[in-house]
Amino acid sequence: MRTVIFDLDGTLANTSADLIAAANATFRLIGLGDLLDAKTDQTAAHASVAAMLRLGFARADTGFGEDQVEKYHSVLLKTYADNIDTHTYLYPGASDAIQALLSAGYRLGVCTNKPEALAQKLLERLGVRSCFASLIGGDTMATRKPDPAPLLEAVRRASGNSQKTVLIGDTVTDLNTARAAAAKIVLVTFGPDGRKVRQLKPDAVLDHYRDLHGVIAPLIG
C-alpha cells in the first residue's frame, strides 16, 4: 500500500507563532522579557522547545545552562498547550491535498517530534486528525527522528508499505529519517528554511500543496 507520512511543525502547519508566544511568556515569567521574534526565529521554534529556550537564554546572556533548559521545558509546554492554535494554521492547500490522497487510495500518517498528546490536540483543532491512520509523536517510542523507528512505526500503524513510503518534511532531520528508513523524502520549500532545503538534495521538493500528488506519484506510484 502506498503510504505518505507527514511531519507536522513547518510541514503540515505553521506553528511557529504560537510556539514563540509560549516561549516569550516563559521568559517573561522569569523576568527576562520577550526574547524571540515570531518572524526571524521560526527555525528555532520548529526545531524544539529546548532550542527556543537555549536561544533566548543566550540572547539574554543569563549564563543559564541545560539545567535551566530542563527546568523551564515543562513550563513552556504547558503554556503552549493552553494556547496551541491561536495563530497556527495549515499551510495553503494542505487540507485539499490530504483529501485528494485519501481519495486516490494512499495510506496517510503523521510522524513528528512534537509530544504525541500535543500533536493529537493540534490535529484535532485543525480538523484533520481523522484523515491520518497513524500518529507517532516525539515521546511515543523510545527514540525519535532522525532514528528511523518512529517513521517505520507510523507506516506500520497506517497499514502501509515501507517500500512504497514517502515522508513529507521540512528539515535535514526529516531527510535523515527517511534515508535511514529507506523511504523517499520530499522537503517543502514553504517551511522556515525555505528554498534552502534544495541544497539537502531530497528526492523532490514541494512548493505548494496543490502539487503534492504530482510530486509523490513518480516516487511511489
Image (spheres, rainbow, N blue to C red):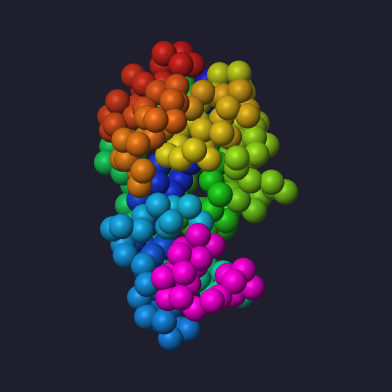
Q: Between 87 and 185, which is closer to the camera in this rendering?
A: 185
Q: Between 114 and 156, which is closer to the camera in this rendering?
A: 114
User: Percent x, y for residue 123?
Assistant: 45, 50
Q: Is residue 186 above or below residue 119?
A: above
Q: Quadrant of residue 19?
A: bottom left
Q: Between 102 and 175, which is closer to the camera in this rendering?
A: 175
User: Percent x, y for residue 184?
Assistant: 51, 23
Residue 125 sits inside the magenta stretch: no
Magenta stretch prevailing secondary structure = helix
Q: Quadrant of residue 214?
A: top left
Left or right of 161 in this view: 122: left
Q: Is residue 198 above or below residue 124?
A: above
User: Which residue lies most toward the right here?
Assistant: 142
Q: Which image quadrant: the N terminus?
A: top right
Residue 52 sits inside the magenta stretch: yes
- Residue shown at the point (56%, 24%) measured from the top left: 183
- Residue shown at the point (28%, 37%) measured from the top left: 93
Left or right of 111 in this view: 15: left
User: Which residue lies most toward the bottom here?
Assistant: 31
- Residue shown at the point (53%, 46%) measured from the top left: 112
- Residue shown at the point (58%, 34%) measured from the top left: 177
Read off the magenta span.
49-69
* Count of residue discs: 0
User: Percent x, y for residue 100?
Assistant: 36, 27
- Residue 195 seen in the current view: yes
Q: Is residue 71 above or below residue 90?
A: below
